[in-house]
Amino acid sequence: MEKSNDTHLVEKITHLKEEKDAIILVHNYQRGEIQDIADFLGDSLALSRQAGELTCKMIVFCGVRFMAETAKIISPDKVVLLPRKEASCPMANMINKEELQKMKIKYPEARVVSYVNTTAEIKAESDACCTSANAIAVVQNIDAERVIFIPDKNLANYVSRFTDKEVIPYNGYCYVHVRIRAEDIKKAKKIHPDAVVFVHPECPPEVIELADEVASTAGMLKLARASEARKFIIGTEEGLIYRLKKENPEKKFFAAGPALICRNMKLTRLEDVYLSLKEERYKVEVEDNIASRARKALNEMLKYA
Ligand code: 13P
Ligand code: SF4
């Protein structure tokens, strides 16, 4: 039988990876065929951690820009490549330095916790970063009673339920997760009354209210593995459903309403990964002065599970 174009590409990628001493890090929202070539597949926290532990020369980051930038900041001596240079997270671009500065002036005694879905410049202006997996722990452990939490208002709202600290939100959001409506969850529950509902904390509060579990993508994978339930309604980007099904073939996973697709995450294809390795493109660079300050905030994030 003749080999498919994808099989050829995967072979070439494997060869180039060895030749260039490269590792492929892949986020849980990537296309199935990209997840399948991952050396490490994970959520933003696990991939950030992984970037710091690797000993290879090169990282190909299949995800969005803030993730590749984070890997570069944590591991500055490695070449970090983002196969599609326009793959960025719109939420990460919702707040700029001037807007953050205004909040700092308004709340001078507050500390700043920024979601990892931010630019390196914003991280450099923050006291700590967090991901959805450890946002509560980071806020709880920061040395201040008032916390400016940027940019995701829904994650800020979710975190505020678990702390007595005053959480001051910004008005950012994820255009993918805000598409899930409470009616979608109710409808899905009617169709699958015996299913457990998992949603990401970037969902709106009225959706979170209806969930059995609120978790990061890695959190959902862990919960699904451990659960006795057989059916699950998943309120996050559909790439995670690919992985959930692959790892739990005996269980059933349903999208909470219409398929949720992050266009930015889906830009990367096998051809892009191949060209990225072959031509060493697109190199992610972060200015030293920004990187050193952002690294401090990221190191705070890495303290918490
Ligand atoms: P995780 O940290 O759960 O992987 O999520 C990242 C993200 O971009 C959510 O939309
Ligand atoms: Fe950004 Fe939302 Fe896409 Fe995650 S799913 S990368 S938060 S736009």
Image (cartoon, rainbow, N blue to C red):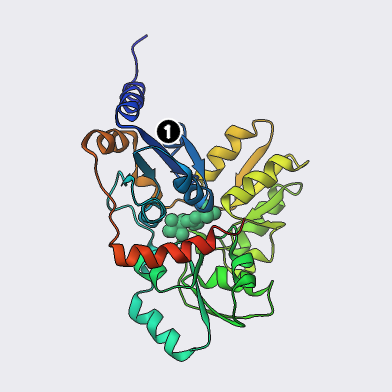
Where is residue 27? Give x, y as percent: 46, 46
Q: Is residue 289 left or right of residue 132?
A: left
Hey, which residue is sitting farthest top in the picture? Answer: 1
Where is residue 169? Give x, y as percent: 52, 78
Q: Is residue 286 above or below residue 269?
A: below
Ligand 2: quadrant of the figure: bottom left
Q: Is residue 305 visible?
A: yes
Where is residue 110? Give x, y as percent: 53, 84
Q: Which residue type carries mark 1? A: Glu
Label 1: how many Cα within 10 Å (few below 14, some 14–19, many 20+): few
Query: What residue do we see at 61% from left, 44% from top?
Result: 254
Please tell me whether mark 1 sits on a helix, a strand or a loop.
helix
Q: Is residue 298 left or right of residue 207?
A: left
Q: Which residue is mark 1?
A: 33
Look at the image and tell me in which quarter the N terminus lies: top left
Query: Is the CB atom of the residue marked by disc 1 within 8 angstroms of ligand 2's nearest atom?
Result: no
Seen from the viewer's position, the closer of residues 20 and 273 is 20
Q: Is residue 296 left or right of residue 211?
A: left
Q: How many marks?
A: 1
Q: Is residue 106 above or below residue 78?
A: below
Where is residue 239? Give x, y as percent: 50, 44
Q: Is residue 258 visible?
A: no
Q: Is residue 50 left or right of residue 287?
A: right
Query: What residue do we see at 43% from left, 52% from top?
Result: 262
Look at the image and tell me in which quarter the C terminus lies: bottom right
Query: What residue do we see at 60% from left, 77% from top?
Result: 143
Q: Is residue 205 above or below residue 253?
A: below
Query: What residue do we see at 27% from left, 38% from top?
Result: 276
Seen from the viewer's position, the closer of residues 12 and 6 is 12
